[in-house]
DNA sequence: CGATGGCTTGAGGGTATTCAAGTGACGTGG
DNA sequence: CCACGTCACTTGAATACCCTCAAGCCATCG
């Protein structure tokens, strides 16, 4: 039974999201993408492959056709902070040309990927020359900053079970308030994404089960009472459940 | 003696930084500012004054002539996460027109301020119409996102004494590697800025004193051995001491 | 069948928080 | 000039939270 669930894992989110859910930049980029088509180089990459490292010289940016990518920073002490985990349809490495020309984080494949690389130069050209594109790109970069602000808030203020609850609620919303859902990746990776040890994640889920009535069966989670979960979680946040930022 | 120090506190950084230290956006904005001059409305605000709240409708952005401003997010539970503390010469509220038209954080005066407000519309107009400005603004917004990435890394990976040491090293660098410096604000505010309780800050400083040889006299800090401090601190970071990102 | 990997659970320890009390500097008003 | 209150800061003790280490479970795979 957990086996079926695991096979089902990839399904809900392994397709590129529909147009309505996309940010202005993603929308525009998908329509502009045709222009870049001849420049794009597709690659299939296995789990564990490092696309680029923090401070590598940046000449390309990437579009994820399928699979998942994690963005991270690594310290000299060997610890790693995960900044984000990107679903299919996302773009990464795209802001390098606004910065020093170096990537400001590392990117690694966490679920076998098909990605397409494009020269940053075409993006840069388009950004300076196409006004609609400029606007959309600026909004895109601003949204990224905003998402990080939110992330700082969550990591400072929420405890472990609340961070997990918040993560589940986000999944829930992305799937039309489904009351049953499947975790998109390994639990240990979600734990890292949320800035906690795998054991803490495991205990946190158990705690949520006790306190908010959710039911857990391997990677499958049932949420009989979304409001109870939101009450428990959103008390430690600046916005309440059907939240977008 | 601590009294003199306290009086001295504001001096080192209470003037607007010189041109060389400014980001491309700040540089450009300072030269463009003349264009907006007639639109600017100066205000003197006392400590504690809230300039705007998270999710207020945004119609203006602000330039800090003197004093300090903190940017923060507040949860329903009453906790507060400080995103940044801005020195004179900074601009805030400027990205609102790229987002939903609402401020995405609150801003509060922490040291009596003189700030100048400008309509966001003039900034927006300039951004779309002046290409140099567009580029500089895009870099500015990207740099803000990068700073937040770094912040996430530091908060996930560093312990309390290391975060304090990192903060001190940053001050140090901003003042030309001075071996003696004065904390720019109250310790309790620095603690909040670093995401820890005031007591933890106090104990962390004591710990640094023991482990790295720095000397503490009220708000004044002596650093006889910068390298020792850097060794202690930067092990839990992706970059080493004379770091800019 | 054993090996592996993801996950869970328990025990122990470390770090940070909270609560509480105490100190010293400063400003006010008698 | 001194008594008093306020405020920032420090220190101690108790607690909460999370991490690490270790063992064990279960499903998968060769």
Image: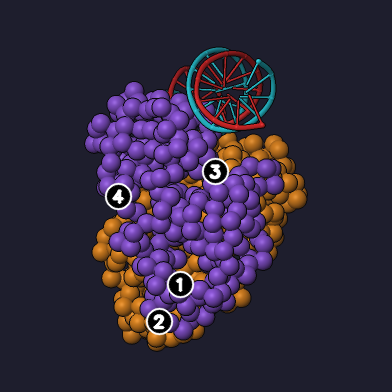
Chain colours: A purple, B orange, C cyan, D red
Q: Residues within 10 Å of mark 1 (few under 14, many from 20)?
A: some
Q: Are marks 4 and 1 on the same chain?
A: yes
| Residue bearing mark 4 | A243
Q: Residues within 10 Å of mark 4 (few under 14, many from 20)?
A: few
Looking at the picture, tell me which residue is in the foreground, A181 or B135.
A181
| Residue bearing mark 1 | A33
Is C17 situated left or right of B106 in this image?
right
Q: Position of residue B199 (x, y in %)?
A: 51, 35
Q: Position of residue D26 (x, y in %)?
A: 50, 20
Q: Are marks 3 and 2 on the same chain?
A: no
Camera-nearest label, 4 or 1? 1
Camera-nearest label, 3 or 2? 2
Q: Are marks 4 and 3 in contact (CB under 8 Å)?
A: no
- The chain letter under disc 4 is A
Residue B156 got which mark? 3
- Write down the quadrant of residue A16 in the picture: bottom left
Q: Residues within 10 Å of mark 2 (few under 14, many from 20)?
A: few
Return the disc, 4 or 1, that comes first in the chain's sequence.
1
Residue at x-position 34% and y-position 65% = B99
Residue at x-position 40% and y-position 81% = A131
Looking at the picture, tell me which residue is in the foreground, A85 or B36.
A85
Camera-nearest label, 4 or 3? 4
Give SS at disc 1.
Answer: helix
Q: Are marks 1 and 2 in contact (CB under 8 Å)?
A: no
Give SS at disc 3.
Answer: helix
| Residue bearing mark 2 | A131
- Above or below, B50 relative to A41: above
């Amino acid at each position: 039974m957990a086996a079926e669930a695991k096979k089902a894992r990839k399904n809900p989110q392994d397709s590129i999201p529909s147009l309505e859910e996309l940010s202005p930049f993603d929308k525009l980029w998908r329509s502009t993408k045709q222009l870049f088509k001849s420049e794009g180089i597709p690659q299939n990459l296995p789990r564990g492959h490092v696309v680029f490292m923090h401070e590598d010289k940046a000449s390309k940016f990437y579009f994820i056709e399928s699979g998942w990518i994690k963005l991270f920073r690594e310290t000299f002490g060997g610890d790693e902070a995960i900044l984000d985990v990107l679903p299919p349809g996302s773009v990464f490495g795209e802001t390098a040309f606004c910065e020093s020309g170096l990537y400001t984080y590392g990117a690694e494949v966490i679920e076998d990927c098909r990605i397409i690389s494009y020269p940053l130069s075409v993006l840069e050209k388009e950004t300076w020359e196409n006004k609609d594109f400029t606007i959309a790109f600026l909004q895109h970069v601003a949204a990224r900053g905003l998402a990080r602000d939110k992330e700082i808030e969550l990591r400072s203020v929420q405890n472990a079970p609340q961070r997990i609850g918040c993560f589940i609620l986000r999944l829930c919303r992305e799937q039309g308030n489904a009351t049953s859902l499947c975790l998109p990746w390994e639990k240990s990776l979600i734990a890292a994404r949320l800035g906690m040890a795998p054991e803490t994640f495991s205990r946190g889920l158990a705690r949520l089960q006790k306190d908010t009535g959710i039911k857990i069966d391997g990677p499958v989670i049932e949420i009989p009472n979304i409001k109870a979960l939101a009450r428990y979680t959103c008390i430690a946040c600046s916005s309440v459940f059907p939240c977008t930022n």
